[in-house]
Amino acid sequence: MDIVVTCCIRNKDALLMVKEAKSKAYGLWNFPSGKLEPQEDIFKGAIREVKEETDYDIRLTGLLTVHNCIRKIEPILRVVYNAEIISSDGNHSYNKEEISEIKWILIDDLLNMIDKVRNPDSALAIIGAIKNNHNFPLEITKNIIN
């Protein structure tokens, strides 16, 4: 089972989202996320994915939710963290072959465009956790290794 780390970065009622440029999800919005590398520390993997996809340096502030996602091949475990931006040089030199755009999207707007989100069920679970103010201790997931 693959482990996908996802970061939910908020600015009041807006969420930082990335628009996919890869062919399998081209044009769909997603939270900054990606597969955990073999033997990679889960916290470092989450921070790495945000840096690669947005060029932001972040700090994880808590665990938002954990859930299974069903894929055609095999299920994945999605671990979603709350995070905050700690620095950016403003250039956003992310990989344009993977991400075509980064944007702050209001939660209500995201709900209205859920058909344009890469994993709608996962996005709805994340938004539900946000609305319920989930923020569990990071230590809960510190021993998860891919």
Image: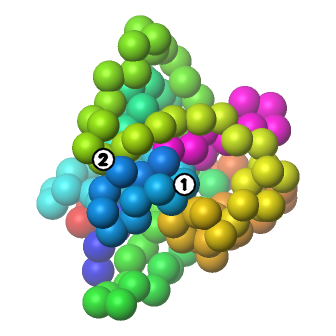
Camera sees residue 139 = no
Residue drawn at x 80%, y 61% as measured from the top left: 112
**Residue located farthest toward the left when viewing the structure as drawn:** 38
Residue drawn at x 42%, y 73% as measured from the top left: 77
Camera sees residue 120 = yes
Q: Secondary structure at mark 2?
A: loop
Q: Secondary structure at mark 1?
A: strand
Q: Which residue is mark 1?
A: 29
Q: Quadrant of the C terminus?
A: bottom left
Q: Is residue 45 left or right of residue 7?
A: left
Judge the density around disc 1: few (<14), some (14-19), many (≥20) Cα neighbours within 10 Å: many
Residue drawn at x 41%, y 41% as measured from the top left: 100
**Residue 76 in the image, given as x and y percentages of width and height:** 38, 77
**Residue 36 in the image, given as x and y percentages of width and height:** 28, 57
Judge the density around disc 2: few (<14), some (14-19), many (≥20) Cα neighbours within 10 Å: some
Q: Is residue 109 left or right of residue 67?
A: right
Residue nearest the viewer, comparing 86 with 97: 97
Q: Earlier in the sequence, mark 1 or mark 2?
A: 1
Residue nearest the viewer, comparing 7 with 111: 111
Q: Which picture quadrant has residue 130? A: bottom right
Magenta stretch, main secondary structure, is: strand
Q: Is residue 113 left or right of residue 90?
A: right
Part of the protein shown in magenta: 7-18
Q: Which residue is mark 2?
A: 98
Q: Amino acid at mark 1?
A: Trp
